[in-house]
């Protein structure tokens, strides 16, 4: 099990990223716009830099939905390799079979 604080920090980052997504995208669009004068684009860069760092989607870590483990994460299942193996062995994941050849 991951520490509760790590999981909660990640959840807080997800919420903040979702709430600030529109603002970040509009500022990035202004920065990339070649039609605006350089001074306006620089102001947009400063506004983007003043935003909270945790509002960036890059800072979100993929974590297991069951245990909160950050490493060995399978995107398709949304869980870590350890939980994937144990649930698949017990037959709780439909369509997942153990390989044999």
Image: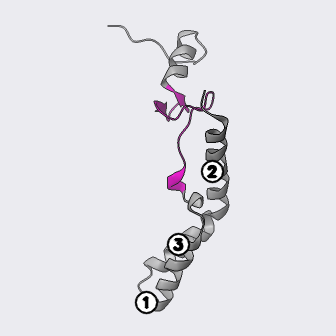
Residue at image mark 1: 38
Q: Residue at x 54, y 55 (%)?
A: 57
Q: Nearer the viewer, mark 3 or mark 1?
A: 3
- Judged from the image, the secondary structure of the residue bearing numbered disc 3 is helix
Q: Quadrant location of residue 101?
A: top left
- Judged from the image, the secondary structure of the residue bearing numbered disc 1 is helix
Please check the rendered image and state whether residue 7 is part of the magenta-colored stretch, yes or no.
Answer: no
Disc 2 residue crowd, few under 14, some 14–19, many 20+, Cα 10 Å? some
Label located before the other in sequence (2 or 1): 2
Give the extent of the magenta segment.
Answer: 57-80
Q: Quadrant location of residue 8?
A: top right
The location of residue 87, given as percent across then percent down, is 57, 16
- Judged from the image, the secondary structure of the residue bearing numbered disc 2 is helix
Q: Residue at x 60, y 64 (%)?
A: 52
Cα distance, mark 2 to mark 3?
19 Å
Residue at image mark 3: 49
Q: Nearer the viewer, residue 24 or 67?
A: 67
Residue at image mark 2: 14
Q: Which mark is residue 10?
A: none
Label located before the other in sequence (3 or 1): 1
Disc 1 residue crowd, few under 14, some 14–19, many 20+, Cα 10 Å? few
* For residue 2, above or below residue 82: below
């Amino acid at each position: 099990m991951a520490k509760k604080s790590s999981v909660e920090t990640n959840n807080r980052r997800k919420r903040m990223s979702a709430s600030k997504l529109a603002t970040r995208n509009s500022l990035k669009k202004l920065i990339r716009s070649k039609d605006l004068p350089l001074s306006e684009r620089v102001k947009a860069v400063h506004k983007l830099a003043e935003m909270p760092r945790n509002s960036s989607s890059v800072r979100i870590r993929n974590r297991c939905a069951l245990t909160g483990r950050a490493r060995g994460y399978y995107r398709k299942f949304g869980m870590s390799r350890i939980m994937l193996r144990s649930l698949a062995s017990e037959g709780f994941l439909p369509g997942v079979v153990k390989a044999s050849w």
